[in-house]
Amino acid sequence: MSRFGTLGAFLKRDFFIEISYRTAFILQLLSIVSTLLMFYFIAKLVDPSPSTPGLDGLPYWPWLLVNLAFFIYLTGAIMSFAGKIRTEQTTGTLEAMLTTPTPLSTIVLGSAVWDFLVTSVRAIVYLLIGWLFFEVGIRPEGLLPGLLVLALTVLAHSGIGILSAAFILYLKRGDPITYLVSTGSALLGGVFFPPEIMPEFLQWASRLLPMTYGLRALRRALLLGAPVTDLLPEIQALVLFSIFLLPLGIIGFRIAVRRARLEGSLIQY
Amino acid sequence: MPTALLIDHLSKIYVKRRSFREMVTHPLRRAVRIEALRGIDLEVRRGEIFGLLGPNGAGKTTLLKILACLVLPTEGRALVNGIDVTREDDKVKRSIGFVTSDERSFYWRLTGRENLHFFAHLYGLDGAGSRTRAQELLEEMDLSEIADQQFMSYSSGMKQRLAIARALLHDPPILCLDEPTRSLDPIGAKHVRRFVSGGLNAGRGKTILLATHNLQEAEEMCHRLAILDRGRILRQGTVAEVSAGLSRRDHYVLQVSGREGMPSDPRWAIRVEQEADGVLRVFADVDRGGDAFSALLRAILNGRGTILTCTLREPGLQEVFDLMDPSGEGTGESKQ
């Protein structure tokens, strides 16, 4: 059985669980629309000049919408690793999965696949609704460079997600990684306002976050139609983040599993 | 008979994690160490049902979890079909099926069939293989009719049967059952016991390691067993071997007529129940060796009593358990 087949089984499992909650899909759609409306009116109220540093000459609303769509996507993706492991621990299904020969890495990855898919669809729906109803111009020539940037951003954030799953396996609660990265990214990563308007030391801190580079490159690709060559500084940064964070996540995860097996706390919560 | 499971001087010490408060208030105090297993040696032969009998906290579940690769031992070795559990856990997991009594180990909003399909994939079966295998097991466990109902609607007995079906998905030669009848009613428990003994062990030659604190279950099902207490094996062997030489007294049941009371003597302890027509049922624990038993019979006959029947009782596991007093709360007469 290939790893893809196993991931497919996870996807099927989560799909069946999801559709067993009949109103969940409609509520999710409603939450997207209400979030969009809320931020649309806030953007209209604030309406900063496109010449504000960091806005790249763009009006605030499309700038915010792209950030919002991918911020929700990336934080959802990071949290899904730890969140699913935590859920499996508390519902008692983790033990049953761990007695099978499927490697723990596949279990963690498989558990997150559905959330990745759902958050991907959600991000697309955000952009689609923004494009159709809220005057957000998405440049078709920016889609491919945007996809490349997104793949690298997901890779870098997956390292963080796996590390946070390691913390959950070992500490059970109080995973500091998800908190630091999601809160830090919301504050410093240029989601709601450009980092350029912050004091210098906070701008410096924002450079330590992959979200900053990912969002900047995605905005430029999707809203300005920037080619890959224009996005090279961000792409290089994201490659470096991935090279550093992915092995860190995997090593951290292995250490956490070994420690949890030694302590006998693998399935405790 | 070849060995299925070999446990060689296995120890497990849990180190209790200290809270931040403890670290601040008592920074120099050492962490609490709990010895769950202390140098266990066991051999389970292929094709037998081996019981792990002991009270809560004896170390039964820890031992099963080590064999299922969920917990790493502190010292010693555990081999499953000759494979070390600490080195090649994926091979070990292919040889073993682990049945927990925890009902929460399934997805409650999925049906029984969907649960089995999912776990079949984790055991390496492909789509068609998982469907066929799940159907076979659902039929075998008599769950076909409710296979497409959500797991949450199952009774405890059905849940337990589905847990056994799951452990059989990859057709492992060895099954570890952790108190499989704990939450079942007597009829449900009987069905599970019959299936494990008859269907799995006698029928298909599966090796079964059964953790239980149900003495009757162990006595009824196990070819051999080990009695665990606080991480140590107190005794192991067949029920007869485990019982042998444990008590310094023999146990007799007599039916006596023509007497109202029974003679007392330090060499025996007697309990009497009144039966119909003036017959007494006498339970006598008599010192082994010497002339104690002859003296008791003489005393009854000299008192004009008539001995109608006399039976020597083999000690059951309950007595063995009482005599060994694994809880440490009794007199510990024969504690070893």
Image (cartoon, rainbow, N blue to C red):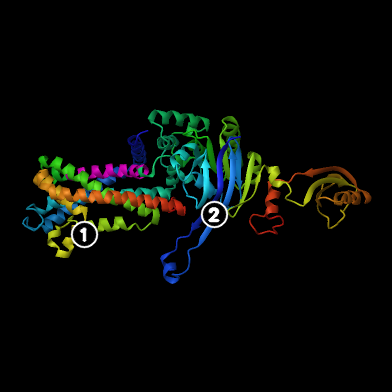
Residue B278 point in image, percent of width and height = 87, 47
Q: Dot 2 falls on which chain? A: B
Q: Residue furthest bottom?
A: B25
Q: What residue is drawn where x is 29% and y is 49%?
A: A247
Q: Position of residue B120 (x, y in %)?
A: 42, 35
The residues colored magenta run A106-127
The three-letter amino acid code for the residue at tag 1 is Leu
Specify whether residue A263 is painted magenta: no
The residue shown at (45%, 30%) is B133
State the SS at label 2. strand
Where is residue A70 drawn, in percent x and y?
20, 48
Secondary element at tag 1: helix
Residue B164 visible in image: yes
Judge from the rendering whether residue B165 lies leftward or rightward of residue B114; answer left or right.
Answer: right
Mark 1: few/some/many CA within 10 Å (<14, 14-19, 20+): some
Number of marks present in the image shown: 2
Q: Classify residue B225 as left or right of residue A179.
A: right
Whether residue A138 can be seen here: no
Q: CA distance from mark 1 to mark 2?
A: 48 Å
| Quadrant of the drawing holding the C terminus of chain B | bottom right
* Main secondary structure found in the magenta portion: helix
**Badge 2: how crowded within 10 Å, few (<14), some, or many (20+)?**
many
Which image quarter holds the N terminus of chain B?
Answer: top right
Name above or below for residue B161 compared with residue B305: above
Quadrant location of residue B130? top left
Amino acid type at circle 2 is Ala
**B170 displayed left or right of B311:** left
Q: Between A225 and A48, which is closer to the camera in this rendering? A: A225
- Give the numbered dot on residue A187: 1
Q: Quadrant of residue A141?
A: top left
Picture disc at residue B36 = 2
